[in-house]
Image (cartoon, rainbow, N blue to C red):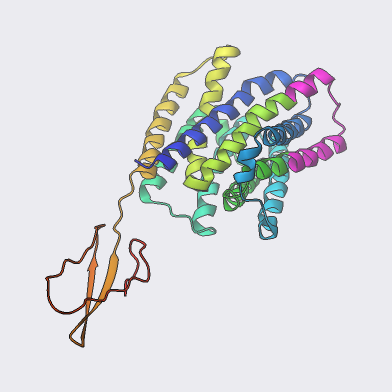
Amino acid sequence: MDRRKTTAIIYALLSAILYAVNLPVSKILLVNVGPTTMAALLYLGAGIGIGIVSLINKKDREKSVRLSKKDLSFVIGMIMLDIAAPIFLMLGISYGTSANVSLLGNFEIVTTTVIALFIFREAVTKRFWLAIVLITLSSILLSFEGVSSFQFSYGSLFVLLATTCWGFENNCTRNISSKSTYEIVMLKGIFSGLGSLVIALIKREVIPGAFYIATALLLGFVAYGLSIFLYVRAQNILGAAKTSAYYAVAPFVGAFLSFVFLREPLSWMYLLALVVMISGSVLVVADTLIHHHIHKHQHTFIHTHDGMTHTHMVTHSHDHNHYVEGEKHGHRHKQKDLERLPGAMHL
């Protein structure tokens, strides 16, 4: 079993769990904090909190590869899309029903996978597509509130635009995920937070009291900062599509936490959706960890026997240790290895 992939799966699931904490706590805070202001404080809490962690954990930060000029387009795209998506989502809410918004919001995983496949050429197997279908179905079941959920309107288009923005944003982040996670989260948090704050001021939302600001910032550090940090590290190994699939467990964890702390009931539909989600997740895990492949190695050996040169080429489909055991005789065998990496050509 690949230890790196196992660790990445744990990171992705922990990321989803930490984000799920945001759902019940935000419901309480939104009574006294405007929605756009809340989004701004959560992002700012993420950026500031991870910035403080980077100062404390200096050794880990110094090991990371810093972002460069060639990453600038992905960084700008990540920030702009993170600002645009909530705006489209708010427009969707204003023109449509909450049930409709919840239902269509689940298609972020689909847009992330399609963009990863067709634009960024990320490998997607048939088994993973089946997992996507099951996970999407489970999310639809979780947010289903009756036939009215399927009503399509201008609001629906805005919600789909929001999920498309987040799909592109996930893939932008994926393309810089091998760089410093600290830099990515700080830039994402601070600039997306400032963008949302400007929008909140334009909307003339009331600035909350110091207690609510501090609480929202702390929640942002835990539910956004640490969550995004783990998400980016998982993306670096799993890719955008698979990390998004694991992250889809967040609504289920959030609903369960709401049941525990807010006494919101769990319906039979939740249990049905949970079974479907687990089935899809099992397929994703299998697709991540069970990877059958064939390595073809080609070796060319040139031996000189009494002035005559013979070239022997062997192609095979398995790893092996190759060695030449010669008989004792009165001439030399010359073998020159230009590369000793597995699968490389030897001359």
Q: Which residues are magenta?
A: 190-216
Q: In the figure, residue 283 lies in which quadrant?
A: top left
Q: What residue appears at the point 70 percent right and 56 percent down from the top-left corner? A: 72
**Nearer to the camera, 59 or 2:** 59
* Residue 197 drawn in magenta: yes
Counting from the top left corner in percent of width and height, residue 225 is at 65, 33
Query: As drawn, which residue projects farthest toward the front?
Result: 330
Counting from the top left corner in percent of width and height, residue 279 is at 37, 33
269 to 101, vertically: above or below = above
Q: What residue appears at the point 66 percent right and 20 percent down from the top-left corner? A: 25
18 to 323, vertically: above or below = above
* Residue 39 drawn in magenta: no
Q: In the figure, residue 327 lies in which quadrant?
A: bottom left
258 to 45, vertically: above or below = above
Q: Quadrant of the C terminus?
A: bottom left
Q: Quadrant of the N terminus?
A: top left
Q: In the figure, residue 223 lies in which quadrant?
A: top right
**Nearer to the camera, 44 or 53:** 53
Query: Taking 295 as reference, is 60 left or right?
Result: right
* Camera sees residue 88: no
Query: Taking 150 as reference, is 273 left or right?
Result: left
**Nearer to the camera, 23 or 285:** 285
* Camera sees residue 205: yes
Query: Taking 282 as reference, is 155 left or right?
Result: right
